[in-house]
Image (cartoon, rainbow, N blue to C red):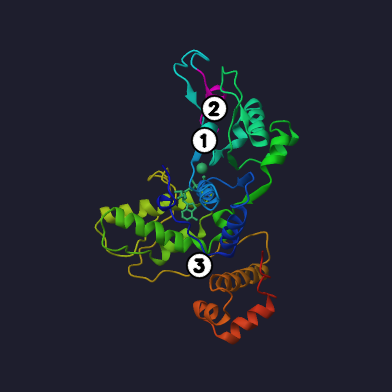
Amino acid sequence: MISPDSLPPLIGQSAEFLALLDRVSMVAPVDRPVLVIGERGTGKELIGARLHFLSTRWSRDYVKVNCAALSEDLLESELFGHEAGAFTGAKGRHMGRFERANGGTIFLDEIANASLRVQEKILRVVEYGEFERIGGEKTLTTDVRVVGATNADLPKLAGEGKFRADLLDRLAFEVINLPPLRVRWEDIPILAQHFGQSMARELGQEHFVGFGMQAMRSLMEHNWPGNVRELKNVVERAVSRQAARHLDDHINDIVLDPFARHWAPVKTVANVPNTPVAPAIPTANADMPFTAQVNLLERNLIKGALSTHGWHQGRAAKALGISYDQIRHYMRKHDIKRPAAQN
Ligand SMILES: Nc1ncnc2c1ncn2[C@@H]1O[C@H](COP(=O)(O)OP(=O)(O)O)[C@@H](O)[C@H]1O
Ligand SMILES: [Mg+2]
C-alpha cells in the first residue's frame, strides 16, 4: 500500500521543474482525468502519485496498471475483472483494478499500448462509471479518476486511428508535460547529490564523499536519454564502485554507459583528487548562436534563483553570488518580471 510518506521526494529547483510542481498542485484537486506526458524516466509515476495524494481522493486507493506489460486479454481482465469460468483458466471471480480503485485514482501507465477494444471500455468508465466483468452480465459502477501516462504522440496516433479520439478528448482534460532532464540541467547537481547521499546511506557510509570536478562535468555534459532514472543509476553505480575501492576522495570515475567494453576506446576522466564540485556546465547547442545560448543561461540562472527565493531579489542575488545591483541589471536586460499571482 502506497502512502504519501513512503513516496520518494521530488527533487528539483529549475524554473521548469517548479512550474511543473505548481501545475500539478493546481490540477490535482480538480476531479477530472489527467494525461501525463514525458520521456522515460522523467518522473511520470511520481507525478501520478502526487496528483492522487494532492486530490480529495488521497485517503482512498491509488492503483497502478502498466498497459504495456500485459496482453490484450489479460489487461482487460486485470482492469475490469472476470467472473468464474469466463475463460479457460479463470478459476474464481476476479475483481478488476477499476473496481478496486473505487473512490480513488487509477494510473494507466503506457496507455497508448492499450488496444482499441480496451480503450473503448476505459472510455465508458470515464464517461459513465460503468463496466462489466468479463463473462458477467451485470453492469457495475465505479467512481475512479483516471490518470494516463505515456511518451507516445497521442494526437498523432488518434489521427492514424490507433488511439480513440473520443478517449483522448476525455483524458486530455488536463495535459501535464514533463520536461526532459537535458532542458533542466540546473537540477542535475542537486539530483546527483540527493541520489549520492541516499546510496551512501544505503551502503552504511557516514557521509557522502561528493563529486569531483571532472565527474560533475561529465554528469552535466551528458544528454540523459533515460532522464532521472538514468542519472540515479549512474550515480548509484559511481558511489558503490567508489565504496568498493575504499576511496575517500571525491568521486571522479563516472561510467555513463555500463555496456561500454573495456577493450573499446573509452573516454577517460582525469583523476583530480579533492577538487571542489564544478559549477553547472550546460551542453552547447550547435543550432543556436553562442550569444543566444549565453543569454539563455543568464536568464535561466536569474529566473531560477528568483523563483527559488520567492522572488526576493536580495536573497536570489546572494544565492548567485552577485550583488543586488547586478541582479537588477540582469532582470532589466532580460526583461524578467515576477509572474502575476495565479489563482
Ligand atoms: N524529480 C525527481 N526527484 C527525485 N527522484 C525522481 C524525480 N523524477 C524521477 N525520479 C526518480 O527517477 C526514477 C524514474 O521515475 P518514474 O516516475 O518511474 O519515471 P517514468 O514513469 O517517467 O519512467 C524513479 O526512481 C524516481 O523515483
Ligand atoms: Mg514509468
Tell me which amino acid carries mark 3. Answer: Ala
> Which residue appears farthest toward the left when viewing the image?
246
Question: x, y percentage for residue 327?
Answer: 60, 81
In the displayed structure image, the side of residue 302 where residue 251 appears, left or right: left
Mark 3 or mark 1, whichever is nearer to me: 1
Q: Quadrant of the C terminus?
A: bottom right
Residue tagged 2: 75
* Residue 68 shows up from this direction: no
Label 1 belongs to which residue? Answer: 65
Label pair 3/2, CB-CB below 8 angstroms? no
Question: Picture coordinates of residue 64 (x, y %)?
Answer: 50, 38
Q: Nearer the viewer, residue 318 or 252?
A: 318
Q: Earlier in the sequence, mark 3 or mark 1?
A: 1
Within the image, what quadrant is residue 133 found in?
A: top right
Q: Which residue is mark 3?
A: 280
Q: Are circles 2 and 1 on residues that touch, CB within 8 Å?
A: yes
Q: CA distance from mark 2 to mark 1?
A: 9 Å
Residue type, numbered disc 2: Leu
Residue 22 versus residue 289: which sits nearer the camera? 22
Disc on the earlier residue, 2 or 1: 1
In the image, residue 81 above or below residue 170? above
